[in-house]
Image (spheres, rainbow, N blue to C red):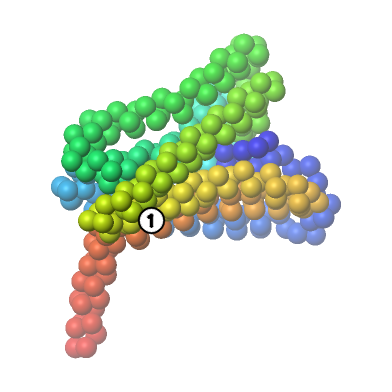
Amino acid sequence: MVISNGIPPNITKVSAWDGINIEVLRTTTTSLLFTCFFFFLLFMAAMLTIFFTNSVARETTRYILFIHMLINDAAYLYLALLMFVFYSYQITFPVPFCYLIVTLSSTTMKVTPYNLAVMSLERYVAICFPLRHGEICTIPRTFLAIALVWTICLIPNVVDFIILCSSVNKSFFLLYAICSRATFTIIPMQETIKIFAYVLTFSLAGLAILFSYIRITLTALRVFSKKESASKAAKTMMLHAFQLVLCMSAFGGNTVELITKDNLVLLPTINFCFFMCLPRFLSIFIYGARDELFFGYIKRCFICSASKIVPSSAT
């Protein structure tokens, strides 16, 4: 498998780790992942509070896209963690329920790169066409772009569902199964479609970010008055490119699998933690800490909290 959407590959060797208590390892990893996810949700709650209590943020395209990416990544992490626990403890569910979870996980994974591409194009319009930015990047068009992103990401899953229905008996959907992508990969064509969808997603997102970066940089060199704002936007493009690389790190699971063939008991945990969860955790924190609105609000909250604690401790 190239990308497992948060589901580790099948475990085929255990001899190298016979002396390790796999149950302790699995419980510790699961607890650590849910702890990280809890702090992620706290950060998300703070970002959502800032967004919905600030009228400027609610009417700004880039903040709407950022909040959409934040909610999408939270949904992806939640589904991925669920599937990881289901797989680790070999919990089975009805096939329709499992397929719905796998489909949503696959879709939310592809949404983030496209969302980054739209955010980059929005910055391109803001710097290169400042007088038309308000006309082009309206709130209705922003939500239309989000709807289009979800439609594009759902198309491969619809095709996969049609192929699956034509490849199995009706009784297949009455069975119980483990919620894993491998469970529903019946014929090689499904794997081909999945690989093509991911390659196309990251390629288009990468081209959009590269195009925006080049045009913004050229604008900064050509128009001196816009140099500062264009330079800041160019750095934002680099941040989006870094976020895209983090999302693409899911492909790194295959490399690790080839290198550590003899340690396949620990491999699923490594792949899931470092290539599925960590990029999503880092991506949102990096963007939130860099943005002036969110960082400034959080900084003021910490300063107010500290000012309240200091006098009380002095007395």
Residue in front for this viewpoint, 51 or 308:
51
Tell me, yes or no, if residue 178 can be seen here. Answer: yes
| In the image: residue 13, left or right of residue 174 | right
Q: Is residue 24 above or below residue 152?
A: below
Q: Quadrant of residue 59?
A: top left
Residue 255: horizontal and vertical position, in percent? 70, 47
Residue in front for this viewpoint, 311 or 230:
230
Residue 288: horizontal and vertical position, in percent? 35, 56
Residue 106: horizontal and vertical position, in percent? 52, 33
Q: Secondary structure at mark 1?
A: helix
| In the image: residue 176, left or right of residue 16 | left
- Identify which residue is drawn at 15% across, 47% down: 55
Name the outermost residue toward the bottom.
315
Q: Amino acid at mark 1?
A: Lys
- Identify which residue is drawn at 48% across, 41% down: 206
Q: Quadrant of the N terminus?
A: top right
Disc 1 marks which residue? 235
Q: Quadrant of residue 125?
A: top left
- Identify which residue is drawn at 46% across, 56% down: 282
Residue 75: horizontal and vertical position, in percent? 43, 41
